[in-house]
Image: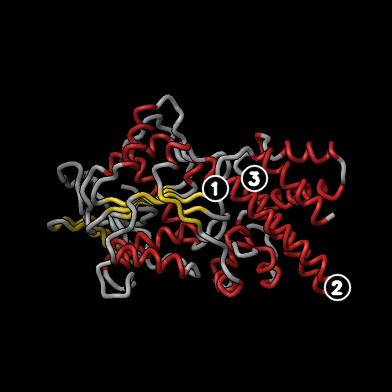
Amino acid sequence: MNLGRVIRTEWEHTGHVLRIVTTSRVVKCFALQSYTTFSPIRCWAHAVLVCEVPLLPVYGHTTLRARFDDAMCRNALPNSLLLHGPRGVGKQRLALWLGQRIVCSGDEPRPCGNCQHCRYALAGTHPDIHWYFPRPRLKDSDPSLAKVEDDFREAIGERVKSGAYGPPPPEEGIAIAVVRAMVQSAAMSPALAARKVYIVGDADRMVLQEDAELSAGAFLKLLEEPPIRATLILTSSEPGSLLPTIRSRLVSVRVPSLGDSESAAVLAEPAMQAAIKSAGGPANQAEQLRLANGAPGSLLGNAEWSDALKRARAILEAATSRDMRQVMRTALEQGSRGARGAFSTSLDALTALLHERIRAAVDRQNDRSAARTARALDAVEVAKDRASRLINPQLVASQLIRELEELIA
């Protein structure tokens, strides 16, 4: 069992409790579900690690949270959900909030934040909230469930420790071994709560085409007929990249951008400021708020966002060039291999650039230009919707550029 760096460890077995004592603090570890008979030398169990640093608070999305809470109260929450929306608006954090709401056993309103389940959920260590996201491929070609969970336990610990984290590198993914581990785990009973929750962040990075038809089929069956005591929540900024057979088995919920006050609250968090600085983002919070455009997390993927801004500026230049060759070249670039999985981020960047144009037009008191640019924003929103429905990004970009030609030229 990998429990991080421990200078001095003492194991004590009393009933179902393992106590790990370090030189710095005491960390309680509950052996809730053993997979092998306990021995003084080796034991594998789900571990609940009491962590001093909780996840960042949830800001915004009050309407969605109210809808989820109402569905929970009516026992009508779908067993398989897809939360999709712009990158950096907090989809995974919202999914974790919903997981906490599902396992909470405290007083209303829930999640209470005080019960045992809430404390473990906020620490990222609840044994019945399983959080998966893109990771480097394990060296073992066919890792066991224990090895996969060890890897994610460590990765989640790093995310909780930092408080804020950027997008995973493009070479990382959700391997078929992780999918197998998820299917195996879902077949087991909950360890502590009444239900188990499976959260798959950046689900569009899931690999299901590795000559693993049985595993892929098992995952699709898991989505279609999840265990009676399990809830699956997938998140994606690129829902159009998900296999149609996966999307058809999920109830889709769009997660919108945050308002200015909510974005400002996220950006005021010390962990966010440290992460933005590490990513090479702007130091001025007013500039951060402007660039975030309702998606504070987008500032943590500085290289990706810079690339998206370049592609968005290319779209604007093509729209104003009246050069058909430039229009076609720009549209074709949106479907290139290097741009795969980034088209919607380019559209988010285009939205940010158009907002800048509107503000500039208002400052110049050019109401006509501001109104036309606002209509261009509507065209970008339509393009986002089309892109989310698996329509070829080249076709979407080509049509969008033609529409922008009439509005911003």
Q: Which mark is residue 343?
A: 3
Q: For residue 153, say whether it is visible.
A: no
Kind of residue indicated by mark 3: Phe
Q: Residue at x 35, y 59 (%)?
A: 99
Label 1 crowd (10 A; few <14 / some 14-19 / many >=20): some
Q: Nearer the viewer, residue 110 or 286?
A: 110
Badge 2 or badge 1: first in the primary sequence = 1
Count every numbered label the image shows and give the total: 3
Q: Disc 3 to disc 1, how far (Cα)?
A: 17 Å
Badge 3 or badge 1: first in the primary sequence = 1
For marks 2 and 1, give the one nearer the viewer: 2
Q: Residue at x 69, y 38 (%)?
A: 394
Local secondary structure at mark 2: loop
Q: How is the image coloured?
A: secondary structure
Residue 25: name its quadrant: bottom left
Q: Disc 2 to disc 3, how far (Cα)?
A: 32 Å
Local secondary structure at mark 1: loop
Q: Compared to 26, does 181 lie above or below?
A: above
Label 3 crowd (10 A; few <14 / some 14-19 / many >=20): many
Q: Nearer the viewer, residue 296 or 387?
A: 387
Q: Which mark is residue 364?
A: 2
Q: Nearer the viewer, residue 221 or 32?
A: 221
Left or right position of 87 against 93: right
Q: Nearer the viewer, residue 21 or 304?
A: 304
Q: What residue is disc 1 on?
A: 168
Report if the CB atoms under discs 3 and 1 are less than 8 Å apart: no
Q: Residue at x 57, y 55 (%)?
A: 86
For marks 3 and 1, give the one nearer the viewer: 3
Label 2 crowd (10 A; few <14 / some 14-19 / many >=20): few
Q: For residue 318, say whether it is visible.
A: yes
